[in-house]
Every structure is written in structure tokens, then in C-alpha cells.
Image (spheres, rainbow, N blue to C red):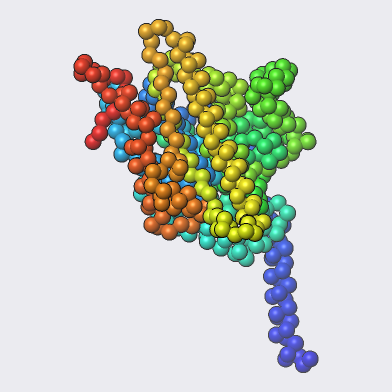
Amino acid sequence: MKYCELVPFRRYLVRTLAGLLLAVMAMGCATRPYNASLGGADPARAYTFLNRLPRNSPKLFVVLTFSGGGMRAAAFTQGVLEKLAETRIIVDGESRRLLDEVDVITAVSGGSFTAAYYGLFGERVFTDFPQEFLYKDIQGEMISTLLSPAQLINISAPHYSRSDAVAEYLDQTLFREKTFADLSSDRRTPYVILNATDLHTGMTFSFTQMQFDYLCSDLNRFPVARAVMASAAVPIVFAPIVLRNQPDDCPQRHPAWVKQALAERNLTDRRFHAATALASYASPETVPFVQLVDGGIVDNLGVRGSIMSQVNHYGHVIEMAGAFSPQALAQVEHVLVIASNTQATSERDWLGSEEGPGLIDTVQALADATNNLLSAETTLLAQQSFDMWANFISERRCPTCAKVTIDFSVLSFDHLSDAAERTRFGTTPTSFRLDRETVDALRMLPDRMLDASPEFRAFLRRMQPTPGTGKKSTAGSATD
């Protein structure tokens, strides 16, 4: 090779080696952001019911549950917020939006995007969220992020996954690098509970400080985007979001109720099973990391392991001790639960074939059957739990004191009267890309469904003027 030919080759070789060196250096630097230690955290600012429940009427307690289902769930739950913003009620003689009386939103997977955005940015959910999320090809942007040269290098690192890459994308775009210190911080928006599933224990993992206490970790410094990603991390498609079980011990991971439940070993008590799972966190040398995946795996409604959680209520679910102080229990009169169940069923193109479904269709059909059965049983369990709680509280009040009423409204595609609509929405793909027409149709559904809900109508009727007296109850409905 002549010298004049060798010089360009050398330059090419140098540039190639330099590029490889930079890639190796980048691989060595890429690592996931772990959750922080609890040391030095201010309990008065912790992400708990006590510190973050909104300052609204103590006589009403309103819970929204946002289910999974990708963009389908995000659009539908956006419609729920829009409907409640348009519904006026009379509370203590004042006209207010029903939305302003919502106390808790508990969400999984696709519903977590809407819930987290509202908890962080409030009214911007109506003006900005559709353009920033619902009408965008989020699925395409996620794929583009994963296939970018920088992220391909990062993902090849040992402590960085495709879920970390997508969480970083969401952190920089949709959620603006906000942490749990920012979520519901002004107490004007509901206390938002984002739920994932712990692969080790098989239990719901709720992003609350009560749950993070068992990891001796401070939730306030944790990015909201990573919690949303954990809630939506469908296994196989996404890797688990990894949390560190902090090695430094703390008294918060050893509550008295866990010790008591383990000592009693009552196998019929839900506290015992919760305590058994929580006890594993007490050994960080054995369980140094927690692997989190989609919350819909064990509870696609987001209610079983959050508002009904032993963890979030300090082992006293019957009193809902996390959400209600003794003073709050004495004041509450009406409870409204609106459960959004956007579970869909995959297409059944194989029904007319003698050969039946292939492997993928079989797995999908089994998943549909399992999720639908679990959601139905979870709904029933949640209704029974709220009824038991209301009876528990009412029985302890004086004979002339107001009793607690419960209205539990389930919004499910199965409740649509039109068969064509049931098929259309029930087979809408679980993806993060839907056309604008479908998104708008999903947003409009809750308006009609709540108007048709007997439980929702009963809730509004309870609060109208007492017939023949002209007097209103402590909270009444009005329409503008």
C-alpha cells in the first residue's frame, strides 16, 4: 500500500477506534437511577395520605380507580376527569365541581399516565395532556428512543434496561423530571397512588411512602416517570424497573402489626399474608433488589393493593387508618367510588377455524380470561370491603348521627347497551397509539356511562333537597 493511500486508512482507523472507545466509555457510565435512602427525610413531607390528601370537604370521600389498557385506558380516564369537572354539587351550601372533591386516584398501567399527569399539573390535564400524550404516537416514540444509537449503547450496559430508557424518555418529556415531592404537593389535586407488581412477592407494590418504608427508602426523591413505567412494564415487552432495598436498617421496616401478624400465623387473615411478603424486605442481604412489573398482573383495577392495602393502612384496613384519622372518621358521611375498568378482549379470528388458535392467540385468550375473572372478583371484593367499612363506622356512631353511605359505580365496556359499541371498544388494541377519532370516542364514553350508572345517580340524589322541607342535606347536587 502506497503512503498516500495509507494516510486516509490510518485516519479512518483512528476515528473508528475513537468511536469504539467512546462507546465503551458510555457503556461504563450508563446506569439506572436508584431510589434514595430514607436517612434525613422529613416525615412531615412524606408521601402519605396524611400529608397529601386534598383540602376539601371532610363529609365526602371520593375515590377513582384507573385501570390498565394502554392508550385506551388513558383516554377513557381522561374522560372521567372531564365529566367530573363538569358535574356540580352543593357542599356545605356552596357549589363546587365534583372533581374538586376527589380525594384519591389509584391507578395501574395505562391509567397511571392520566393519574400522574393530573396529580402533577392539575388543570393542564384538560389543555395539554391530549396534545402531549393522547394524540401522539407514544408507542412509535418509545421505539425510536430504544433504537437510537445512544440508548442502544446504554441498554447494552449491565445495569440499564429498555425500561430504564423509556422511563428516561418519559421523565424528560411528559413528566418534566418531576419527583414524588411534586406530586399532589399543593393539596389541590387528589392523592395519587401508582401501582406495580413485585415479581418476588406477587403482591401489589404501591408507590407510597408507607410501602417505601419497608425498603428504608425516601419516595419523595423518586422520579414519577419511573413509577409510571413500573406500573406499565408489561413482562417480556419491558424489563422490570429495579429498586434497591437499602442495606441500612431503619425502624420503619419493622412495624408492630407485621410482627403481630407473623406471630399469630392466622392463615385466614389477609394481614398474615401481607406481613409474610413484607418480612422478606427486612433481609436486604437476601433481597437486595425489588423487581417491579405491570400492576395489572395482580389487580388491573388498582384497588385491591392500594386503597384496600394493609401496607397503606398500617395493618388496619377495616378502619382505613392510613386515609382517615379518628376525627375524619367521625365526619365522613358519603363515599363515592368510580371504578374505570377498560379491560378489553382480543380478536377471536380463530373461532371459525377447526384448527383453533395458534400459540400467541392461545396465550392471549388465557390472559383475557384470567384478567377478566380477576377484575370481576376484585370489583366484588372492593364493594364488600367498602360496605364492611361503612357498617363498621356507622355502628360506632350515636343513634341519631348520620350513617355512612357507599355508592360504588363501575364503568365497564360490558355495561354499554349497544352491541356494536361493546365490540368496538372491547376490542380496541392495548397499545400506546390510537387514532384521534378513537381517542375522542373513548373520552366521551364516561359522560354517558356515568349518567346511566344507577350508583352515580343515587349518589347525586342523596344530596338533593329533602322533599317538602326545602332544606338541603350536608351535600347536595346541582346542575349548571
- Location of the N terminus by quadrant is bottom right
Indicate whether 134 appears above or below 199.
below
The residue under the point 41% across, 27% down is 407
Residue 457 point in image, percent of width and height? 34, 31
Quarter of image, res 199: top right
- Residue at image location 48% in from the left, 53% down from the top: 428
Q: As displayed, is residue 15 above or below residue 224?
A: below
* Closest to the observer, 435 or 240: 435
Q: x, y percentage for residue 255?
A: 66, 22
Q: Can residue 100 be seen in this view?
A: no
Q: Nearer the viewer, residue 458 or 29?
A: 458
Instruction: Identify the residue at horizontal 45%, vertical 42% (top origin).
Output: 414
Query: Residue 82 location, x and y as percent?
Result: 36, 42
Quadrant, the C terminus: top left
Q: Is residue 326 left or right of residue 164?
A: left
Q: Tell me: residue 447, above or below residue 141.
A: above
Viewed as shown, does residue 452 lie left or right of 298? left
Q: Where is residue 402 in the image (x, y as percent from the top left)?
A: 38, 14
Q: Pick out the residue farthest to the top.
A: 399
- 350 horizontally vs 22: left or right: left
**For residue 310, above or below residue 168:** above
Res. 62 image quadrant? top left
Please tell me in which quadrant of the rendered image residue 56 appears.
Answer: top left
Residue farthest to the front?
354
